[in-house]
Every structure is written in structure tokens, then in C-alpha cells.
Image (cartoon, rainbow, N blue to C red):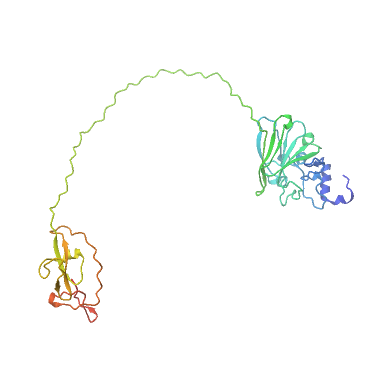
Amino acid sequence: SVYQGVYYKRPGVLIHELGHNFGLAHSGGLDGQTYTDHTCSMGNPHYSDDAFQCFNPAKNFQLNWYTDAKITEDPRTNGYDTTLTMVGIDEYNIRGGSPVTVRLETGGGADYFVGFNRASSTGPNRMNDEGDNQVTIVQVNGNNGESYSQSFLKAKLSQGQSYAITNYAGTGKTVTITATSIDISTTPGTALVRITNGSTPSPTNAPTNPPPTNAPTNPPTNVPTFPPTPAPTNAPVPTFPPSPAPTRAPVADVSKYVCTKWQPADPTICAEGSLAGGSCTSENLGSSCGNGGKVCWWASCPGGDGPPSPPTTPPPPSPPTGCPACAYGNNGVCCGTCVDSGKPSGRGCF
């Protein structure tokens, strides 16, 4: 290689000239010019002191630096449809089994090449001039990409984009290359690339064999059948109407009273009261029946031993304003709790 002027000390120029010494031709761009593929050092992208950039997929295939990570596919095959997980050359050492460059055979020498132009922050392609972390497609002029041949960049695909090659290699088929997904959040970063020619595979004819020989079959022997034995029926169990619950003769209600100052509840009158007589002879008369403001309080109560009538809710009594005097003339009954010297005397209302 010959270096003019100060170019001998510029890494980008040195790498380009070394590429020629390795047998690499120039890399042209999308515009068809000789040096304008700036995804590759053979396109003269750098004239500065720093040049962290390698080569495109066609040049990487030719160099044989990645012999265990380059593959060849033939999309001319009827029904061809494949999906590949690709990694970039700057993560070649941790690629697993993924390829870094794929050759698409045309049968005429002008083959296509597909690669993932990974540009990690510390990798050898971190100073790419274009196509960072995109799927790149390159075609060579001849020699199947195995020796010196000019290459041209055909497409740079971001996630979801496709590149179609009509009448691929004269087959009449359209080969479509799609960057299905690109993930640079993982290590290594990956590109999922689908390649298909959109044709329907030829059907495989099922083998024709003579019909199988049926094994002889013997007529079945009829098993004698017997009429089913009817299930025994039990004599019906007679049913009788239920006996009605005994009813008690109605008992007439009676009137009872108590003689107090405050009106008690009806159940209390029925449980503790007396029949008419003495000073309370007429129901609902409300007559006085003793000292201390006592009056007759009446209630209609069930007669005999029958259950008491449902209780009624009386109005709440008015609280006494003081302890009334105990009246010993009426059997010691008073209408309150008597208090002597601040303590209950033991006497009260009944």
C-alpha cells in the first residue's frame, strides 16, 4: 500500500489499506458509488485519528475470520422460509451458536450477504458512520464473495423493516428479508431475521401401497338373551292423615288490677295483680286506692292457665322527683324507694 501525505498516521486509512492487503475490494454505498458504504472500512469512512470500525458482511465472509459463524442459505428453493438469530462480530466470542454473516446463494456469483451491524459501546464497531445496530444487506459483483470483488450496500433495516429482491436469481420469485426484531438490551445483542421467497412448497405425494389384506373374520356367535327379571314391588304402605293437634276450649279473659302510683306494664298487672274487689271494683275507673297518690291500674288478662296476652309497650314512666313518704297504713306499701339517712330503708314499691 502507498500512503500519501499525512494519511500514513491515520488509523482509518491504515485499516482500509490493510484490507486491500488482505484481498478486499472497495465497498460502495446505496448510491452505487465505489467508496460510499460507510458501514465498512473499505468504504473510506474515516480520515481521523480514531477509527473503531470493521467490515461489512461480505468482507467478513471473505476474510474467514469467523469460519464457525458464517453460513450459506439458498432461497431459490421452492417454499424457502427460514428465521435466523444473528449477532454482531463485536460479540462474536459470546454468540453461542448464532451466525455473524449469512450468504444467500444466487448460483451466479453475485451473491447477497446479511449481517447484524452491532455497535456496542466498547466493541470494534463503536465508531460506525452509519447503520448502527441495524441489519445490513450487501451484494458482491462476483466470485461468490470468496475473493476480491466490489460490494454494494443494498439495505439497512431497523426492526420491522423488510427488503424485497424481485425475480431473485432469475427464478421469478421475490425473496424478502425482514428484520423481525432487534434487541440490544441483552448480551449479546440479537437480530431476528426472516428470509422467505413467498412460494408454496411442492406437496409430497403419499406413497401408494397395495391395500392391506383383511384378516378373515368368523361370524359372531349369538349369546342367548333372557328377559329381564322384574324387580320385586313392595306392597304400598297405607298413609293416614295427620291427627290434628288437640285444641283447648277457649278461656274467657278476666280483668286484674294493681294499686300503685305509677302505671306498670300489662304483663306485670296480669302476673301480680288481683281480681276486682276491695277498693278497685270497677275497671278503668281510675279510683284512688291508697295513700300517696295510688290509683287502680287495670289490664285484660287471659283466664285460667292460658298464656298471657302479648305484652304491650307502655310509655316510659316519668321519673320520680323525690321519695314519697311511706304509708304504713296501706300494708307498708309506698310508691318509691324510701331512704333513711342517705341509705335505702329496705322498703319500696311492689
Q: Residue at x 79, y 45 (%)?
A: 41
Instruction: Name the one closer to the observer, 287 or 35.
Output: 287
- Residue at the far front: name it: 285
Instruction: Name the one closer to the observer, 195 or 335.
Output: 335
Q: Quadrant of residue 261?
A: bottom left
Residue 20: x percent and y percent? 83, 42
Q: Residue at x 14, y 77 (%)?
A: 328
Looking at the image, residue 76 sits to the left or right of residue 312; the answer is right
Q: Quadrant of residue 176?
A: top right
Q: Quadrant of residue 283?
A: bottom left
Q: Would you place residue 53 above or below residue 296 in this image?
A: above
Residue 151: x percent and y percent? 79, 39
Q: How many marks?
A: 0
Instruction: Name the one closer to the observer, 169 or 308.
Output: 308
Residue 212: x percent and y percent? 52, 19
- Residue at the far left: name it: 278
